[in-house]
Amino acid sequence: MNQPLAIVTGAGSGIGAAIAIELGRRGFHVVATDLDAAAAQVTARAIASAEAHPLDVTDAAACDALVARLVDAHARLDVWVSNAGISKMQRFVDVAPADLARTFAVNTYGAFYGGQSAARAMIALGAGGCIINTASMAAKKGGVPFLADYVASKFAVLGLTQAMAYELAPHGIRVNSVCPGFVATPMQSRELVWEAALRGTASEVVKQMWIDDTPLGRLQTPDDVAKVVAFLASPDAEFLTGESISVNGGAFMD
Ligand SMILES: NC(=O)c1ccc[n+]([C@@H]2O[C@H](COP(=O)([O-])OP(=O)(O)OC[C@H]3O[C@@H](n4cnc5c(N)ncnc54)[C@H](O)[C@@H]3O)[C@@H](O)[C@H]2O)c1
């Protein structure tokens, strides 16, 4: 197969689906993976050259097994996107150990395991590659309400991105993150309801607060993020590694 191969986790919804579709538009053969196998299928059907596979990113052996199968079938691996993530809004003092563990299992360990599987395969193939992690504005700014476990899990992703970039550079593998702000996805719809309840106000009020916090004056779309991921995966970003690029309409500037 001549097409470059891109594997995206959490591709059944929101930002991951948009990333998969954008990479497909730019000529990749896309592997859409998700915990929700049916959702991954829906995404794959929207792409000219694609396939879908179930994948739970908290399962390191499953990440390795899927990458091995795909590399056997396609004899290449060009791009891996660790995008799967979860959030649950609650006060810091109320976060139970099981919630903390689950948030880290998906957001941090998931990116770690998937990154390891992809890097092992890319090193063995000897042709370099590109790994992109979906972090968050909350990976750079802890001053956000009701997301302490999420913030901690995403700050860790930025450190991981730098450590991976450093170690994998000699193999020609670039590693970067994107840090989205307020993106209109099913995750955001859930957060609107939680934050409104925790603040004792209406979802519409919270939504307007988020827009008011965004200098470019609107909620983000998943496509806003997907286009930056596609840039990072392109030769235009060939000398870019270890970076965590904010894509947030100016909602947080660093
Ligand atoms: N929506 C936002 O405002 C926002 C902002 C910053 C960062 N992010 C990050 O972007 C990424 C995508 O978020 P989204 O808003 O599209 O969320 P979403 O809930 O719409 O989609 C997340 C997808 O991940 C999948 N998933 C969950 N657990 C999984 C697991 N263990 N293994 C594999 N897949 C799993 C879900 O099934 C779902 O399809 C996440 O990492 C999230 O933290 C989102």
Image (tube, helix red, strand yellow):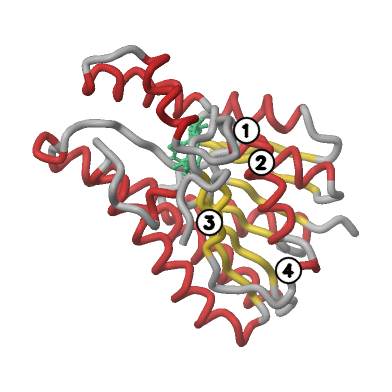
Residue with the mark numbered 4: 237
Answer few, some or many: residues within 10 Å of disc 1's Cα (few below 14, many 20 plus, some between 14 and 19).
Answer: some
Answer few, some or many: residues within 10 Å of disc 4's Cα (few below 14, many 20 plus, some between 14 and 19).
Answer: few
Give the residue type at disc 3: Asn
Q: Are marks 1 and 4 in contact (CB under 8 Å)?
A: no
Residue with the mark numbered 1: 221
- Front position among marks 3 and 4: 4
Closer to the chain start, of discs 1 and 3, is: 3
- The N terminus - image quarter: bottom right
Asked where in the image residue 73 lies, by quadrant, the reply is bottom right
Closer to the chain start, of discs 1 and 4, is: 1
Q: Residue at x 69, y 30 (%)?
A: 43
Q: Residue at x 47, y 73 (%)?
A: 162
Label annotation for residue 111: none
Relative to residue 137, is residue 132 drawn left or right? right
Q: Where 133 sits versus 169, above or below?
A: above
- Distance Cα–Cα, label 1 vs label 3: 18 Å
Answer few, some or many: residues within 10 Å of disc 3's Cα (few below 14, many 20 plus, some between 14 and 19).
Answer: many
Relative to residue 161, is residue 41 drawn left or right? right
- Front position among marks 4 and 2: 2
Q: Nearer the viewer, residue 216 or 22?
A: 216
Closer to the chain start, of discs 3 and 2, is: 3
Give the residue type at disc 1: Thr
Residue with the mark numbered 2: 224
